Image (cartoon, helix red, strand yellow):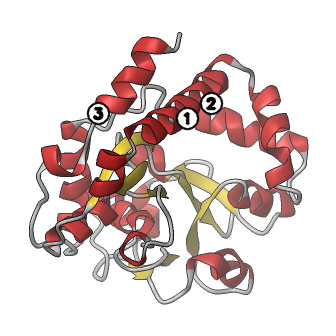
Amino acid sequence: MSFPSNQVDIGFMGPEASVYVYNKGKDDYAVNFAQLTQRDGSFLVARNPMEKFTFDMVKGKTIIGGRKGGMPEMTLEYVLKSNNIIPGKDVNVRTDIQFSVMAGAFKGGEGDFVTLFEPVASLMENEGAGHIVASIGKEGGYIPYTCYSAKKSFIENNPEIIQKFTNGVYKGMKWVENHSAEEVAAAISPQFPDADMEILTEVVNRYKAQDTWKPDLILTEEGLNHMMDIVEMAGELDKRAPYDKIVTTEFAKSAMDNIK
């Protein structure tokens, strides 16, 4: 997280990072002011097709799950436990492979399953190297997965910048909500040169269908508590941060009231 070293003014990350910073006792902690996604964006990819997949099928297997303590890995653990699958007992969840090389490790023969974000999951399926069998986002339910945040002092000293930034994010989210998957895919295609339009359109449709993006930008207290439940369940949280300290809804509400 770059806030402590003053490398950035506005950050984009999971709100669990702001909980960790607040719990370190820093006076100028990070405050979340706009939520972007409300579900985990990863998918469980199997080595072979599994048309009638149930989570019992991962018993005795190995899943490449990502960095220990990272939100993708903790959400995976939450989904497994919700399906009465205990990591370390019923299934081996590997956390020793870096996020950026998880797909390559799986293609190279590591693990029976891997969790991947789009469009990597669909590209893997298109190559015949893996098969999407479950949505971690759908199984995990509503989670404030990614948010925009800034140090408390920056928000207090620059409310106009934060408001303009939030307005821009909200306009973008409304545009996505009101345009087709094909139009969204065309807009984002320069960011994903390895994925063709058919795959990108499928990706957008998939994320739209499971309500991955949060159109109102408001991080709710219920959502924050659910996220902290997941982090606690993973053994990564000793103390909860108060909602009214690490969240402000002022800018999101203003954007919603003034932008139609």
Q: Amino acid at mark 2?
A: Gly
Say which mark, if any, is on residue 207: none
Q: Check the image and name the residue furthest to the top.
A: 260
At 44% across and 23% down in the image, what residue appears?
A: 255
Inter-mark Cα distance, 2 to 1: 5 Å
Q: Residues within 10 Å of mark 1 (few under 14, many from 20)?
A: many
In the picture of the structure, the residue carrying the numbered disc 3 is 249
Front residue (pair 32, 176)? 32
| Secondary element type, mark 2 | helix
Q: Assess whether mark 1 and mark 2 are in contact (beta carbons under 8 angstroms).
A: yes
Q: Amino acid at mark 1?
A: Val
Q: Is residue 257 above or below residue 235?
A: above
Horizontal side of 27 relative to 173 (left or right) equals: left
Residue 75, x across and y down, in percent: 37, 60
| Secondary element type, mark 3 | loop
Q: Amino acid at mark 3?
A: Thr
Say which mark, if any, is on residue 169: 1
Inter-mark Cα distance, 3 to 1: 14 Å
Front residue (pair 229, 238)? 238
Residue 117, x across and y down, in percent: 61, 58
In the picture of the structure, the residue carrying the numbered disc 2 is 172
